[in-house]
Image (cartoon, coloured by chain):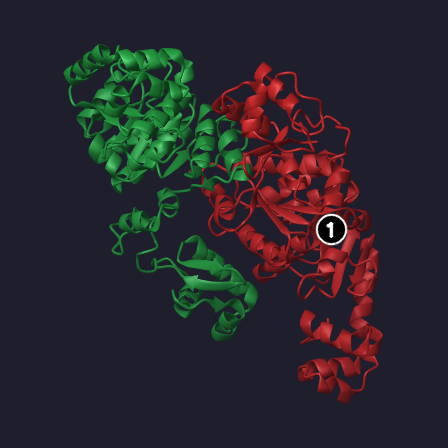
Chain colours: A green, B red
Amino acid sequence: MTPGVGPRAAARLLERFGSAEGVFGALRSELERLRLRPEAVESIALRDRHAAAEVELERLRALGGAEVLALDDGAYPALLREIPDPPITLYARGAWRECLEAPCVGVVGSRRCSTYGQNVAHLLARELASRGLTVVSGLARGIDAAAHRGALEAGGRTAAVLGTGLDEVYPRDHRRLADEILGKGGALVTQFPLGTPPAAENFPYRNRIISGLSLGVVVVEASELSGSLITARLALEQGREVFAVPGNITSRNSFGTNFLIKGAGAKLVQQWQDVVAELPAEVASALLPPESEGGKGFDARTAPPPADLSEGERAVLKLLTADEPAHIDELAGRSGLPVQELSALLLGLEMRELVRQLPGRCFVRKM
Amino acid sequence: MTPGVGPRAAARLLERFGSAEGVFGALRSELERLRLRPEAVESIALRDRHAAAEVELERLRALGGAEVLALDDGAYPALLREIPDPPITLYARGAWRECLEAPCVGVVGSRRCSTYGQNVAHLLARELASRGLTVVSGLARGIDAAAHRGALEAGGRTAAVLGTGLDEVYPRDHRRLADEILGKGGALVTQFPLGTPPAAENFPYRNRIISGLSLGVVVVEASELSGSLITARLALEQGREVFAVPGNITSRNSFGTNFLIKGAGAKLVQQWQDVVAELPAEVASALLPPESEGGKGFDARTAPPPADLSEGERAVLKLLTADEPAHIDELAGRSGLPVQELSALLLGLEMRELVRQLPGRCFVRKM
């Protein structure tokens, strides 16, 4: 709240004086040496925002279940701390601890979206949340709202990152959604002080936090100049995984997502497993346990071979192990099948996620 | 037509004896040393298929405008000659010379397809053919037919590769389409002798020729176990570019194409330029001439900056050259814009194909 002190100056101050207390106990001459703006030096030396800060904390307590996390708190989300210039304070309300301790995945997209986009966001968020991931989004209309609702439907965790103060939900008609998120074990998060009204220039900061909190961000639908594409770009710059859901090239709403896949290195998502497979191994293996819990028929990886395999596919699958890559010529020899037919059978098995092709026309069984 | 002699044995014979005449002039003992099947040695030594071959050539002449190209002809398509085990004879009818001398691109997909798929195949084929590419497809229902028709509508070239003899068009109700292709400067091509009826086992050979003739293959729509996926796999194995058109993940018809993009290295196609951009440089540059001929607003690359750029985008574009990559921090300094806003503007320019991002957050203007 100190005038003239943004995240960078704050970081410099904390580095120099070790803690907020250290900063406010510093000599004016020491502050001046850090080349802060004069009004910042003045405000810190006079501690003239302390009364306002007390009021802020009281209002926060009155709101119920809300806290301010400081960058040097143990509670501050570890992934967010890694981004360039993380916010030095983060306001959080609801079950933020549980939500932010679990692995988070952002699910975002256009406000103006198609029914397809809404359905996919809802479905994907539901599937991800039901596996224990926290679905992070921006509480906006369209894809964001569908993502939060999908996670809630699964009885899972969801965190809404706001571009306003915790007490100023935007858009207004998402107040009920915000209440539902709080009531069902979700969380609201923002870097903006109480009372901050919606302002266009704040939403990019919100997007930075969505990707900053998340291991990866899934863009479900985005038109040519959608803000979600900025989120995707920020996520890439923060070293996060970026995913996009493809759509018909004749749909404006999928232009941006198709573009991300084509030209910006986003990974194509057909189903929730495509997201989980790219998360760090320890997260992915916890979410895809060795014993299948019935992934609605999607998760073939851990299940016994599906009953509808053809005889040929079954025979080829038997020739493969998970440890020893087999060359296609070797498989042709062992199966007695022409390479062309074998290739077709292997492709079928690959598409059912039973087999993986390695470089050099070698194949292994997926476990 | 010699029993027991497929492409491999034929290749061995030609290698040993230099020409078809050499093969038929060979001593029986020489033939036996090549470990051919006994019936093949017998047939070659007795020249017992020569009369049948004469009849075949006469029937072909009667058909009009048809020829047999042999592997060692100059007229045999050069790209097809490069694939493993190319057919030693290729039947061609119509303007095959013009069609196969021009750069070819396969446009294929499911027989059962959606309206979306049909529209995209038609549009894409039209755009590609109007730039002088020959659109190669399989004369099947669905995507194939739409691709041929799109090329014809553009007044461009199209070649239909058959899984039957030249005189046996399949499906029957595509006879008129086949006639239209021949009448409008297109061609029919097959490896199968006259009179070969449709048989399921022959269609994979047809697919091999589609990709074999082509610099790249675009799969427009394909369900999970579609033959088009086999074509894509064969094309990859032949070292051809493979492209796929994405579609809604809720559509069965796009499952295969999305899968190809996600897991099999296919390039995502949003518009015809995405195909051309991946073709060999000399082909691409001939098709994308320095002076834009008005690509329906798609081809921004060569046009002056579009009128609908924002002031910010215009300003950023002015800072960029085609030769000197500029780092984003440098651009921020020169423009006075915050990096975040700049990043958004650059992404917008990138999506309009005016700017390219290089590794290390550097940017250049596209020419």
Callout 1: residue from which chain?
A: B
Q: Residues within 10 Å of mark 1 (few under 14, many from 20)?
A: many
Residue A175 occupies quadrant: top left
Residue on which disc 1 sits: B188
Q: Which residue is situated farthest in the bottom direction here? A: B29
Q: Which quadrant: the N terminus of chain A? A: top left
Residue A26 occupies quadrant: top left
Residue A68 occupies quadrant: top left
Left or right: B107 in relation to A126: right
Q: Amino acid at mark 1?
A: Leu
Residue drawn at point x = 37 percent, y = 27 percent: A12
In this picture, is A85 found above or below B336? below
Q: Position of residue B228 (x, y in %)?
A: 56, 50
- Can residue A8 be spotted in the picture? yes
Q: Which quadrant: the C terminus of chain A? A: bottom left
Q: Position of residue A218 (x, y in %)?
A: 40, 35
Left or right: A200 in relation to B315: left
Residue drawn at point x = 44 percent, y = 65 percent: A312
In this picture, is B208 found above or below A93? below
A202 and A312: which is toward the camera: A202
- SS of the residue at dot 1? strand
Residue drawn at point x = 59 percent, y = 45 percent: B243
Q: Position of residue A226 (x, y in %)?
A: 48, 24
Left or right: B109 in relation to B303: left
In this picture, is B210 found above or below B250? below
Left or right: B4 in relation to A156: right
Residue drawn at point x = 56 percent, y = 22 percent: B333
- Can residue B6 be spotted in the picture? no
Q: Position of residue A166 (x, y in %)?
A: 26, 18
